[in-house]
Image: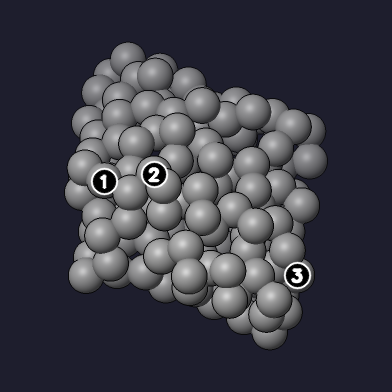
Amino acid sequence: MSFLFRGLTRSSSIRRLSLYDENYICFNGIQSMVPFLQNASNLLELNITGNKNNIIAEGFSLLFRALSDSPIKKITFNNFDMDSFEIDDTSVPNNLVILDLNGNKINADGCRQIAKLLRRENATLKELHLGHNQIDDEGIS
């Protein structure tokens, strides 16, 4: 994975990047993506789907921080069995319109982090997808 992202780091034309379940990405793979994501001046959509049990919550938080100054509008992070994660208010992508977190195991702690995202002063989020998670009454309230 690191070879791919080393090459992509020099690319400024990528607008959409999708990595599906045949790509077994672990936390080290996410770390190798960071330089590309920080320099991807035209990346509007990132879709990482179907890597169950390979990327931990820290990987999601790392992705969010790496994309904080990017023009990204849509992040899809599906099927990771991730129950919670940390969102730093200062490192939320400023142009994020769609956040798709379907198929994880997001619980009440994860909902608290999502609430921080939604309460931001200049929130741009228009769509939030949370299907097939473990959100209960505590997470909703």
Q: What element carries label 2?
A: helix
Closer to viewer: mark 3 or mark 2: 2
Q: Using the rendered view, name the quadrant where residue 10 is placed.
A: bottom right
Camera-side residue of 52 and 77 = 52
Left or right, residue 115 beside residue 30? right
Mark 1 / mark 3, whichever is N-terminal? 3
**How far separated are the C-alphas under marks 1 and 2?**
7 Å
Mark 3 vs 2: CB contact within 8 A? no
Q: Is residue 53 visible?
A: yes
Label 3 – label 2 distance at C-alpha: 23 Å
Report which residue position mark 2 lands on. 27
Q: Position of residue 86 (x, y in %)?
A: 51, 26
Assess whether mark 2 and mark 1 are in contact (beta carbons under 8 angstroms). Answer: yes
**Residue at figure coordinates x 23%, y 65% from the top left:** 21
Task: Give the residue at x 21% y 42%.
Answer: 53
Identify the disc placed on residue 54: 1
Q: In which quarter of the image is the C terminus?
A: top left
Residue appearing at x 33%, y 49% in the figure: 26
Label 1 element class: loop
Q: Evaluate if marks 1 and 3 touch, with contact meaning CB atoms under 8 Å apart.
A: no
Looking at the image, tell me whether mark 1 or mark 2 is earlier in sequence order: 2
Residue for point 28% across, 67% down:
23
Give the alpha-carbon distance from disc 1 to disc 3, as whole Å. 27 Å
Measuring from the top left, give residue 34's x and y in whole percent. 59, 53
Q: Identify whether 118 is placed above or below 21.
A: above
> Farthest residue in the front direction?
3
List the residue tagged with mark 3: 41
Mark 1 or 3, closer to the camera: 1
Which badge, 3 or 2, comes first in the chain's sequence? 2
